[in-house]
Image: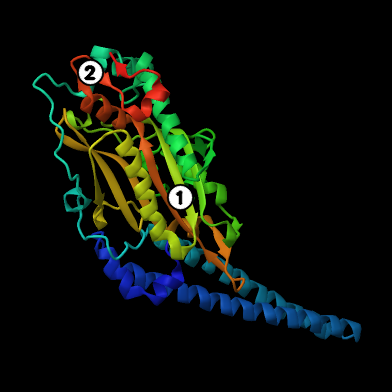
Amino acid sequence: MLQINFIRENKDLVIEALEKRGLSTKETLERIIELDDRRKAIQFETDSFQAELNKCSKEIGKLFAQGKQNEANGMKQQVADIKEKVKANSEIQHTVKKELSDLVISLPNVPHKSVPPGNTEEDNEVFKAWSADLPTLGENAQPHWDLAKKYNIFDLELGVKIAGAGFPVFLGKGAQLVRALINFFLDEAREAGYLEIVPPLLVNESSAFGTGQLPDKDGQMYHATVDDLFLIPTAEVPVTNIYRDVIVNEADFPIKLTGYTPCFRREAGSYGAHVRGLNRVHQFDKVEIVQIVHPDKSYDTLHDMLKHVEGLLTKLELPYRILRLCGGDLGTASALTFDFEVYSAAQKRWLEVSSVSNFETFQSNRLKLRYKNETGKSVLAHTLNGSALALARIIACIIENHQTPEGIVIPKALQSYTRFDLLS
């Protein structure tokens, strides 16, 4: 959530920056400033009324002490009139604050200056291309959904029976591969200095709001309405919310957290080869990395997180590229996002497997996540997160790219986890 003072002091900058997202926000920002001025004026008037009330209360006490009851009772009417004015102001203030809050919440984050303009994924910029030749497979190469049936890796129809479309059931060595990847990703994160967290899989509305899922992505989350809880779309939500309403010590930066969770998203719904198999599902496993850092360090941290994800893909022997997302493709909370895509040799297309983002102060303002600087002033921290990695598409790419006539060759980095080197 943008800070109102930032909007006031940088209105033209915000207007120009949000145009990268394809948004015209001049009228909204002017209304926000107008409402903030109105809020301040009402508060000033209310404070004046309150000061007058305090003065009158003391005067009434003196009059009663002096035996001047008629004068004291007369002043009581004056107090009653002031109280009515305070009450009326309170009602107006509530309306003004509600409209002001709704407008501020409706604004996405200001994109970083390096974000390219654009409205669709076609406008995303290739930040780092794959430098080698893309893998090619023989004429008998198969997509992962056919390989899954051949080697009994996962069963989509069984998932439909149990839950519905988009809920794969992994079987045998396929299940072992899932567990191996989770442990591999967690071990790599832990070796990089991240503290492992096992968080809840459901969160309350405050948590979903804090990291930006609400109200922006309300329709994409599963909602347990009886208890008003939401199934998490990513571990970012519960892990980051550990620090909601917390003032951290500056000396504790960087705060590095990682967590594995199943993730739940209602967003599937289109049809075709691009969403077949594991390309888009409602439930998938993911290891997330989260950092809370000093504002001066957040972009260095972002690039460190990119290197971490690159290292994972290199060890999995998968061809990848990195995209810098354009303004129109950015998530609401993000100032800058890099997507990792892995090339699927069987499908001959790139599949997104990770997003790494810097939210700057957008999340921390909602979370009230601060630290005290050297002057003792409370300052908003910067938050970042990244997928390291999302399993469904990673598994699709592993079994497609590493297929041979004998079976699926397991990358060397995983073999100590799977305890087999060939899935056949």
Residue 192 in picture, x, y percent from top left: 46, 44
Residue at the disc numbered 1: 211
Residue closer to the observer: 406 or 361:
406
Residue 52 x %, y %: 69, 82
**Residue drawn where x is 31% and y is 75% of the image:** 12
Label 1 or label 2, whichever lies nearer to me, is: 2
Rendered image: mark on residue 147: 2
Where does residue 308 sit, x and y in percent of width and height? 38, 45
Q: Determine if residue 146 is in view.
A: yes
Does 233 appear above or below 246?
Answer: above
First in residue order: circle 1 vs circle 2: 2
Q: Hey, which quadrant is residue 84 in on the image?
A: bottom right
SS class, disc 2: helix
Q: Is residue 347 above or below residue 65?
A: above
User: In the picture, residue 397 is in which quadrant?
Assistant: top left
Amino acid under disc 1: Thr
